[in-house]
Image (cartoon, rainbow, N blue to C red):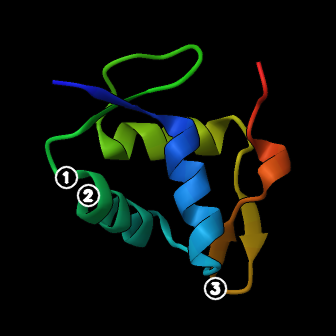
Amino acid sequence: MSSVHGHQVLEMMIASQQPYSTASLIEAINQRFGSDARFHTCSKQDLTAAELVDFLASKGKFIPADSGFTTHFDKICNH
């Protein structure tokens, strides 16, 4: 099974131009990439959607918004 980079999730969030809650982001990830998809980042491997969302939140990748959170291109590392 292939793995989706967390950057693709951040890019999906930016493209949607809408705020998410944790639950709605996990749902959107599952709809976009499939409920069996696995994810990786520059430092983590084999994450579920929920684990990825928790990890991204812990790394400060989300920006608080009125009804949840968003992200921005400057939150995506470029290495």
Residue under circle 1? 34
Quick check: 8 left or right of 47? right
In the rendered image, which residue does mark 3 sit on? Answer: 67
Q: Residue furthest bottom?
A: 66
Q: Quadrant of the C terminus?
A: top right
Quarter of image, res 71: bottom right
The quarter of the rendered structure image containing the N terminus is: top left
Mark 1 near mark 2, Cβ–Cβ under 8 Å?
Answer: yes
Q: Is residue 59 left or right of residue 74?
A: left
Q: Secondary structure at mark 1?
A: loop
* Three-letter code for the amino acid on which mark 2 is drawn: Asn
Q: Relative to 21, does residue 43 appear above or below in the rendering? A: above
Q: Position of residue 37 (x, y in %)?
A: 22, 39
Which is more toward the observer, 75 or 53?
Answer: 75
Q: Is residue 2 above or below residue 35?
A: above
For residue 56, above or below residue 1: below
Of callouts 3 and 1, which one flags the residue occurring earlier in the amino acid sequence?
1
Q: CA distance from mark 2 to mark 3?
A: 21 Å
Residue that numbered label 2 is attached to:
30
Residue at image x 60%, y 54%?
11
Q: Amino acid at mark 3?
A: Ser
**Counting residues from the N terminus, which is met first, the one under dot 2 or under dot 3?**
2
Figure quadrant of residue 36: top left
Dot 1: few (<14), some (14–19), or many (≥20) neighbours within 10 Å? few
> Residue drawn 73% across and 86% down?
66
Q: Which residue is painted at 75% across and 68% down in the image?
A: 64
Residue type at mark 1 is Gly
Whole-Å distance between the Cαs marked 3 and 1?
Answer: 25 Å
